[in-house]
Image (spheres, helix red, strand yellow):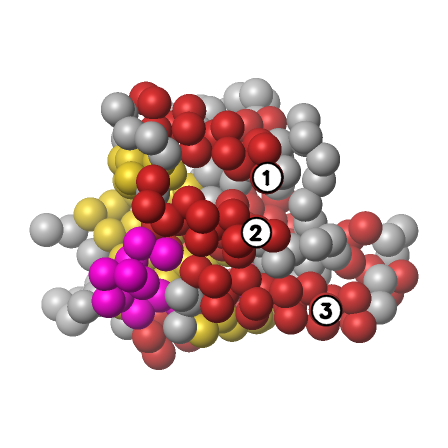
Amino acid sequence: MKTVLVVAAHPDDEILGVGGTAAKHAACGDEVYAIILGEGQTSRGEKREDISQEVVKELHKNTMESAKAIGYKDVFFADFPDNRFDQVDLLDIVKEVEKKVRELRPEIIYTHYSGDLNIDHQYTARAVLTATRPIGKNYPVKEIYAFETLSSTEWNFDYSGQPVFCPNVYVDITDYYEKKEEAMNCYVSELCEFPHPRSLEGMDVLSKARGMTVGMQRAEAFMLIRKIG
């Protein structure tokens, strides 16, 4: 049994990017956790306070319903301001990740790709790499993978100097896709209508396209950031 930690910026990223793989880990007996660093939704008002805390609480309720469908053992919320991570000291975000790494001692971490269009995704990726510096012989984290997030990863056109997402690890999620879809259906406020990429149809297309690349029915694709053997 392994301990797996998903570090996501927003509610639903833990499903869009790695839901099928998380379900597969859980089915294999691994303990799978997620920490969601941003509160979600509050960037949709002109000011952060325009979105009530009741809306945020409802979103987090959706997260826990979604987690049950996947098999997440627990999900933790840090409540940093949505789409405003650049207004927070990076050290504060790093410390939140460090705290969970110390507490859970995960062998495997999945997180965002550093070149995503979304600023919160970029800061999350930086925070994870900083928090998981491989120091000491008892260092727990052996593998770190970056996932892609629909409506962010594919919209980076190399403007930032970061190369576009180019996966080199593929996980067969054919038997777990229904769980991913069930979980995403819990996010009633986050789903959009196709052809928006953050839709059930968009998720379906991506899983088939990634699978087709490597001779599978469906897959999730990742970039290997670090593996210690």
What range is drawn magenta here? 23-38
Residue 81 painted magenta:
no
Secondary structure of the residue carrying numbered label 2: helix
| Res 184 label | 2
Tell me how far mark 3 sits from mark 2, CA to CA.
15 Å
| Mark 2 crowdedness (10 Å alpha carbons): few <14, some 14-19, many ≥20 | many
Q: Residue at x 45, y 73 (%)?
A: 74
Q: Which residue is mark 1?
A: 200
Tell me how far mark 1 sits from mark 3, CA to CA.
21 Å
Q: Which amino acid, mark 1?
A: Leu
Q: Is residue 143 left or right of residue 56?
A: left
Q: Which amino acid, mark 2?
A: Met
Q: Residue at x 31, y 54 (%)?
A: 24
Give x and y (percent) for residue 63: 58, 64
Q: Residue at x 79, y 66 (%)?
A: 55
Q: Is residue 26 left or right of residue 42?
A: left
User: Nearest the camera: 28 or 84?
Assistant: 28
